[in-house]
Image (cartoon, rainbow, N blue to C red):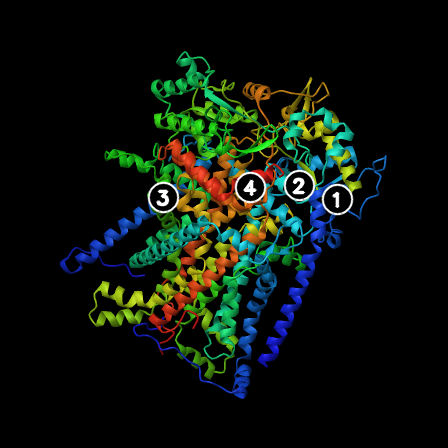
């Protein structure tokens, strides 16, 4: 991408000052965002860490070794990965389809469909009926319970639709003239042009699923099907038990799992970020 | 077309309304009987159809308990602490089956969601046969007829006599015992920095005045002492025995009668003491926002002079981690000052679900409950675990092996903490060695601590608890921090108590 | 994005008779098929259990069959002045948090958008959205330390300037400030994702056209960028309005006895009730109450949206 020409010459001075201030401000912001996480990282490495210590006195990788070696810790991690990927794929597909459908101004029953979706955002039956429902469906202890309903939320669908609206209608008309079925139009035109939308909603679904813990606790009976977030909560909220003493390594482990649960998205984001670059929709209209 | 749809909807609505009332009417009788006689099998209208799910239950048992109690094939059990798959649960269950021939159908639930899941289990009628409940929940489940009355079984089996009667008294609800504790609960005792006492050439305080003086001198003469006494909040007489001196924050029972602790004159005295101590800077300035974590962390850092916490194993931990950061430091458990007592945590215990048949309940009681408290093989298994996996024989002692989950620590106990066992261990070659710090704190609490009885359920209390707790917390915090005088606090509470009709709660608790 | 310079007049589909409608349905048949997955998913996972709402009118515990009690559950909640104060707190805390959050997220998104270096953008975006992933329990414990009047960094700076330390979390006036700041800290970065995505979708030609017309950089931001994403902003706002009453986690972990009156929200109020009883009827009633209020809020907001933009977020 283009890098801006910065200079202090008269015409561009204001702009340059702004850019510099902006950069400083953003760096400061990043520092504020990172420091607490940094503290958690330090806590995960230093068995003697107490209070606000920003540099470890000792370093021990015990906590991370434990996570890598203990089945009860790395298995949930994989469960998390599996359910997140599954939920994102399924969720994105269903969300985009639904969004595309409500986009159609003239489709009969549009208000009904929109109402159908919105109602679920506002009203819910509660924990017990939901639980009994899953039981009756025979989906207990089945990871599909997490994957299937995941991305389908009013929020995502409405958001997706508002992104779709930016695609000029001329494209649709052109496609229709070419004889495309709605499905083909969807596949060949709408999706490729909606990369920022897919990226952001996809990210939302992924993060939402990754952070879920309640459905796992409610519906999974095998410990092998718990996800990582459940483990994180278990460890952090261990304090509630009076009898079990918490050793230094337990405290390190607590911090380490917090780091591990954040980690994947730090890595993923730079890859996703490229979809947020400008100009992706340009060129489609010209010619 | 529209009219037909409307008609249909109305018909459906009417039908469902009628259906609901039918179910509603049928409820009257069973609800009454289940609260009057929780020990009987009277299933609520719901469970009759669905209870075939509950493992092993059947229709009402025969009227005479068979003299010969058969071994059950399996028992379902939910836990949320103790062993889990990482530290050898599998091996343990295998060993249990080997010894007893009974298969334990076990599920581990993360502690934080345990009670939610348990309630769900009840709602969906897939209840485990054995599960543990703590104080408040015990009262709730008992009042709903969800757990069996174990008193007759306890008495006839002799288990009753082996245990300190204070415990039965504390865990009983309306005179009946619904749960058998796995172990004696932990008690809390006060720890002070023994090394600082030595430095100042001071004796362990024996009265309140001496206690305060000690804190004063800590703060004045010990530079590292940033915090005199710390605690996670001011609402617990257990954490601040020296200040409460017998006063109670919530509802408590005295001579068989339930009273409102917050309204008693000794609570006003307690508030005054805390206010004065706070003003003088002897209490942690952040006592209101502290959590147990932050208190412990401050203790480990070495800047706290006095901290009240669990005795026993925690005594050891407080010492170890303190020393890791501060050479030569000593976490000294002290005896209570003359005006105060230490108390045990509220009891929790193992219960048998009411959906289990009487016959099965007896089986469970005999082969599971009695077994774990038998003073011999069973108790050993529950205390120390599997030989070779969790412990090994070392002379006359049981030597814990490294914890399978965390090799830097040892597995001192699996389900029952050996030194907190309900019944004494009779095998002579199975002693458990403990660190001094553990022993010392235990000795103190064992000698003096007092059990905390469970508050029974009261409908009015359920209704007003949100408001009551809000007001009490607010008043106490404001008084301690000096924003309100004690007189104002007392007056404010009187208003609240009248407004919320606390008297009705007391009447209900006292069975009027 | 749609050109939002003028109010768009609402698109009103022409009225059709039955036969025309059937033709349309046939014409759109593929779309109905495309809608099917979502329809089924919502049906099975949301609509099947929705009968549970009726329990708001029942005495509903896990231990016995539910019995009809009419509005009694609502009575439990509504009779207490403290519940209404919690309600008011919920609305105040939640809406201010929402508005602040959006203002800052949009602002930050615009600032990040100004950065031309791709590397720097990636780093910034990645780092500012980290706090979102740290659970509130952890956030609360860390910031309690930072804000400690005895040993916290913030007060260290304050005392260095010669002032008295401030016990932030225990002070009625400061607690809310801290609450908003912590929410901003945690969610601003995450909130920028959607605005950055929206900005990425803005037609570059519009910027070029404005530049040709002689607009300064700021005018381009004000008259092109912001209007272009205004639909997104309003949509996000209205959608979040539906969840405004669900405030719980952040309050629960930061609450303490000193500020309990001014920080109590519906969620924490009902939570305390739930500790000693297992009455799901009351919590369902509370949920129903929240749902109804949310509907009202959304309807009002959507109507306002219509006035501003010419049509609601749902079209």
Among numbered discs 2 and 4, the one appearing first in the sequence: 2
- How packed is label 2: few (under 14 Cα within 10 Å), some, or many (20 or more)? many
Q: Chain of mark 2?
A: B
Does residue B61 lie above or below B321 as drawn?
below
Q: Is residue B428 visible?
A: yes
Q: Disc 2 marks which residue? A: B142
Horizontal side, residue B149 vs residue A201: left or right? right
Image-based side of A10 in relation to B269, left or right: left
Q: Give the labeled residue for mark 4.
A: B504
Q: Does residue B289 appear anywhere in the picture?
A: no
Q: Is residue A46 left or right of residue B448?
A: left
Q: Nearer the viewer, mark 2 or mark 4?
A: 4
Q: Are marks 1 and 3 on the same chain?
A: no
Residue B356, numbered label: 1
**Cα distance, mark 3 to mark 2?**
41 Å
Q: Say few, some or many: other residues with alpha carbon within 10 Å of mark 1 (under 14 / 14 to 19 / 20 or more).
A: many
Q: Nearer the viewer, residue C94 or C257?
A: C257
Q: Are marks 3 and 4 in contact (CB under 8 Å)?
A: no
């Amino acid at each position: 991408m283009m890098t801006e020409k910065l200079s202090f010459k008269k015409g561009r001075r204001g702009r340059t000052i702004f850019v510099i201030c902006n950069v400083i401000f953003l760096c400061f912001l990043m520092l504020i965002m990172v420091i607490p996480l940094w503290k958690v990282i330090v806590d995960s490495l230093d068995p003697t860490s107490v209070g606000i210590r920003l540099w470890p006195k000792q370093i021990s990788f015990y906590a991370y070794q434990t996570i890598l070696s203990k089945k009860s810790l790395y298995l949930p991690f994989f469960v998390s990965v599996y359910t997140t990927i599954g939920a994102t794929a399924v969720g994105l597909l269903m969300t985009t389809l639904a969004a595309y459908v409500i986009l159609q101004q003239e489709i009969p029953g549009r208000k009904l469909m929109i109402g159908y979706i919105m109602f679920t955002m506002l009203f819910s039956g509660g924990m017990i009926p939901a639980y009994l429902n899953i039981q009756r469906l025979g989906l207990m202890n089945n990871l599909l319970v997490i994957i299937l309903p995941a991305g389908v939320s009013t929020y995502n669908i409405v958001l997706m639709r508002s992104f779709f609206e930016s695609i000029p209608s001329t494209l649709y008309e052109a496609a229709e003239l070419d004889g495309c079925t709605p499905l083909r139009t969807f596949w060949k035109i709408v999706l490729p042009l909606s990369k920022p939308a897919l990226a952001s909603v996809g990210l939302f679904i992924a993060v939402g699923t990754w952070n879920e813990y309640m459905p796992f606790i409610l519906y999974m009976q095998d410990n092998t099907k718990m996800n990582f977030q459940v483990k994180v909560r278990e460890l952090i909220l261990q304090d509630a038990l009076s009898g079990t003493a918490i050793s230094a390594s337990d405290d390190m482990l607590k911090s380490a799992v917090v780091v591990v649960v954040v980690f994947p998205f730090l890595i993923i984001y730079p890859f996703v970020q490229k979809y947020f670059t400008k100009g992706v929709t340009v060129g489609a209209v010209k010619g | 077309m529209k009219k037909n749809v409307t008609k249909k909807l109305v018909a459906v609505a009417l039908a469902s309304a009628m259906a609901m009332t039918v179910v509603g009417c049928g409820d009257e009788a069973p609800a009454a009987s289940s609260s009057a006689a929780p020990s009987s099998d009277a299933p609520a209208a719901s469970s009759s159809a669905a209870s075939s799910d509950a493992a092993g239950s059947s229709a009402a048992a025969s009227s005479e308990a068979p003299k010969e109690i058969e071994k059950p094939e399996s028992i379902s059990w939910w836990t949320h602490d103790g062993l889990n798959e990482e530290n050898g649960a599998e091996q343990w269950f295998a060993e249990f089956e080997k010894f007893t021939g009974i298969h334990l159908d076990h599920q581990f639930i993360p502690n934080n969601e345990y009670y939610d899941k348990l309630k769900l289990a009840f709602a969906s009628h897939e209840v485990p046969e054995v599960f543990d409940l703590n104080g408040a929940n015990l009262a709730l489940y008992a009042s709903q007829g969800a757990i069996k009355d174990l008193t007759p079984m306890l008495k006839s089996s002799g288990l009753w006599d082996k245990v300190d009667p204070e415990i039965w008294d504390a865990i009983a609800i309306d005179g009946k015992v619904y749960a058998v504790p796995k172990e004696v609960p932990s008690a809390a005792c006060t720890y002070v920095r023994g090394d600082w006492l030595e430095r100042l050439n001071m004796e362990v305080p024996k009265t309140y005045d001496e206690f305060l003086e000690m804190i004063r001198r800590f703060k004045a003469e010990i530079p590292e002492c940033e915090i005199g006494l710390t605690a996670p909040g001011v609402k617990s007489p257990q954490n601040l025995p020296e200040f409460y001196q017998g006063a109670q924050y919530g509802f408590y029972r005295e001579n068989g009668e339930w009273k409102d602790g917050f309204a008693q004159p000794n609570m006003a005295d307690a508030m005054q003491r805390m206010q004065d101590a706070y003003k003088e800077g002897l209490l942690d300035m952040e006592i209101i926002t502290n959590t147990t974590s932050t208190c412990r962390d401050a203790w480990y850092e070495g800047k706290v002079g006095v901290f009240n916490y669990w005795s026993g194993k925690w005594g050891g931990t407080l010492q170890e981690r303190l020393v890791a950061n501060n050479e030569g430091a000593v976490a000294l458990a002290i005896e209570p000052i003359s005006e105060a007592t230490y108390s045990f945590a509220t009891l929790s215990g193992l219960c048998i679900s009411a959906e289990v048949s009487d016959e099965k309940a007896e089986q469970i009681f005999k082969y599971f409950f009695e077994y774990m408290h038998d003073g011999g093989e069973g108790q050993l298994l529950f205390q120390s675990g599997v030989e070779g996996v969790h412990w090994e024989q070392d002379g006359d002692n049981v030597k814990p092996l490294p914890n399978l989950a965390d090799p830097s620590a040892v597995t001192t106990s699996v389900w029952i903490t050996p030194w907190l066992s309900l019944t004494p261990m009779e095998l002579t070659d199975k002693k458990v060695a403990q660190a001094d710090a553990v022993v010392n704190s235990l000795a103190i609490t064992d000698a003096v601590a007092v059990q905390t009885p469970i508050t029974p359920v009261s409908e009015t209390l359920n209704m007003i608890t949100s408001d009551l707790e809000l007001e009490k917390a607010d008043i106490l915090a404001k008084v301690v921090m000096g924003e309100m005088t004690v007189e104002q606090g007392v007056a404010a509470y009187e208003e609240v108590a009248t407004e919320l009709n606390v008297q009705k709660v007391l009447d209900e608790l006292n069975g009027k | 994005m749609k050109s939002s310079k003028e109010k768009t007049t609402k698109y009103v589909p022409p009225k059709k008779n039955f036969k025309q409608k059937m033709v349309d349905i046939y014409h759109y048949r593929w779309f109905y098929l495309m809608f099917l997955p979502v329809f089924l998913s919502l049906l099975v996972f949301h609509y099947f259990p929705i009968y549970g709402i009726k329990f708001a009118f029942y005495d509903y515990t896990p231990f016995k069959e539910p019995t009809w009690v009419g509005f009694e559950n609502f009575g439990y909640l509504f009779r207490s002045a403290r519940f209404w104060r919690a309600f008011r707190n919920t609305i105040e805390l939640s809406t201010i948090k929402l508005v602040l959050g959006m203002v800052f997220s949009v602002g930050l998104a615009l600032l990040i958008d100004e950065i031309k270096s791709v590397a720097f953008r990636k780093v910034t975006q990645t780092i500012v959205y980290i706090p979102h992933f740290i659970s509130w329990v952890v956030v609360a414990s860390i910031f309690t330390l930072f804000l400690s009047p005895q040993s916290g960094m913030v007060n260290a700076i304050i005392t260095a300037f010669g002032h008295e330390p401030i016990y932030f979390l225990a002070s009625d006036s400061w607690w809310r400030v801290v609450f908003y700041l912590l929410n901003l800290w945690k969610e601003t970065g995450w909130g920028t994702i959607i605005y950055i995505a929206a900005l990425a979708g803005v037609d570059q030609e519009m910027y070029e056209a404005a530049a040709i017309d002689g607009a300064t950089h700021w005018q381009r931001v004000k008259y092109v960028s912001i209007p272009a994403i205004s639909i997104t902003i309003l949509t996000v706002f209205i959608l979040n309005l539906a969840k405004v009453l669900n405030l719980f986690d952040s309050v629960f972990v930061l609450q303490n006895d000193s500020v309990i009156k001014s920080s109590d929200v519906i969620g924490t109020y009902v939570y305390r009730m739930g500790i000693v009883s297992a009455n799901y009827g009351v919590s369902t009633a509370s949920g129903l109450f929240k749902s109804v209020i949310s509907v009202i809020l959304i309807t009002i907001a959507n109507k306002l949206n219509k006035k501003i933009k010419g049509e609601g977020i749902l079209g």
